[in-house]
Image (cartoon, grey):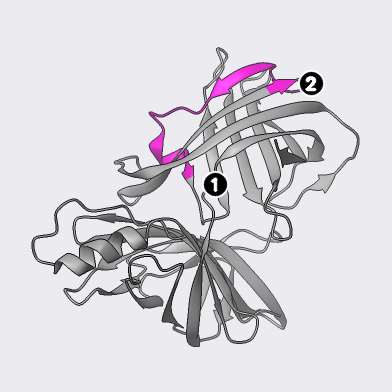
Amino acid sequence: MHLCKFSLLLLLLPCHCLPTFPQNNASASSALNGNWHLTGTGDKSMDFSLGKDGNEVYGEGDLSISCIDGANRVELRGGVFVEGPIAPDGSFVLGNPHAFTVGNGNANPDIVKADVLTIRGKLPTPGSDQWSGSFALSAFTATNSPTSADCEADSGDFTAQRLADIRGAYKGSYGLKKTGYEQFIHEGGTEGYVSLEITQGEMTATRAPGEFGHVIAANGRVTLTGSTKFPSGTFSAETKFDANTRILDGKAFMLQLPRQNDGAVFIFYGRVDDQDKNRLQIEIRYMSKDGHGKYQTVLGFGWLTRQ
């Protein structure tokens, strides 16, 4: 069981003017541009998506931690937002100022309170593809009535290694999946075919309800063909939905595709394969209304290969 397994992609945007920072720290900010995979002792690892606005760093990542729920040990996973200031010496301390949710697919998500995660680091030297830091996770209870899970404290050092941006052209196919709470059964077969063009964008401020002010943008265009369950055609990600069109954690992204004429919601997820950086695991969610006005969900699952 992994005690604390993060995934963290770091994207820090260049700053054209940092009057309170020495010039070498402005160069170091540029050196931190891009994606990063953080690994520590044992089996701990992280991918986060970070960006800079003024003297603040904002980020989104994937957190996994070992917890005790009743008599069972479970691994809970969820997305977490972090933020914190950059000091004049180039060091930064990030925390989670907002509560977030975690789950394991077998029950409703648990709520995790704010201020349980701390990430410390320092801007790398210009030209470096590596930097180091430490993390600390406080013990906490993930609460969700009528259940709760006691989660263990953990801490350690890590080394961050640069990853490639999420960008490129991909093609592949997908099959259908049965619906369920974050746990799906692949039914097999080929339902349709997918072409994807995606480019990792810059950090953008968003005021969408439920978001925390900043996301790493993703620009994408999806072409679907051959399906009787999903619409066919080419769909560009809705740039007006910045909160839902973004890089999630360094290896994953989410594209909000245009609503259909009947109001159907269309979302495309992708994640870079851990073993092969040229492959993407994808999930397509198409939520349309039935004859009674209730939403029904069709799920597609498949693999795409870089062209």
Question: Where does residue 247 sit, x and y in percent of width and height?
Answer: 49, 47
Q: Which residues are magenta?
A: 224-246
Residue type highlighted by circle 2? Ser
**Residue 89, image quadrant:** bottom left
Residue drawn at the location 77% of the way across and 27% of the way down? 193
Q: Is residue 283 above or below residue 94?
A: above
Furthest-front residue in this view: 127
Question: Where does residue 99 sit, x and y in percent of width and height?
Answer: 40, 64
Precedes in sequence: disc 1 or disc 2: 1
Q: Is residue 96 magenta?
A: no
Q: Is residue 84 above or below residue 262?
A: below
Residue drawn at the location 80% of the way across and 19% of the way down? 226
For the residue carrying disc 2, how many other residues have a C-alpha within 10 Å: few (<14), some (14-19), or many (20+)?
A: some
Q: Is residue 114 above or below residue 213?
A: below
Residue drawn at the location 54% of the way across and 19% of the way down? 263
Quadrant location, the C terminus:
top right
Question: Where does residue 240 sit, x and y in percent of width and height?
Answer: 38, 28
Q: Nearer the viewer, residue 226 or 273?
A: 273
Q: Nearer the viewer, residue 164 or 284?
A: 164
Residue drawn at the location 62% of the way across and 79% of the way down? 66
The label shown at residue 166 is 1
Furthest-top residue in this view: 261
**Residue 270, image quadrant:** top right
Q: Is residue 240 magenta?
A: yes
Q: Left or right: where does residue 178 sit relative to residue 40?
A: right
Residue type highlighted by circle 1? Ile
Q: Secondary structure at mark 2?
A: loop
Q: Left or right: where does residue 288 sit relative to residue 96?
A: right
Furthest-left residue in this view: 19
Q: Is residue 18 above or below residue 176?
A: below
The label shown at residue 227 is 2
Question: Where does residue 265 sit, x and y in percent of width and height?
Answer: 57, 27
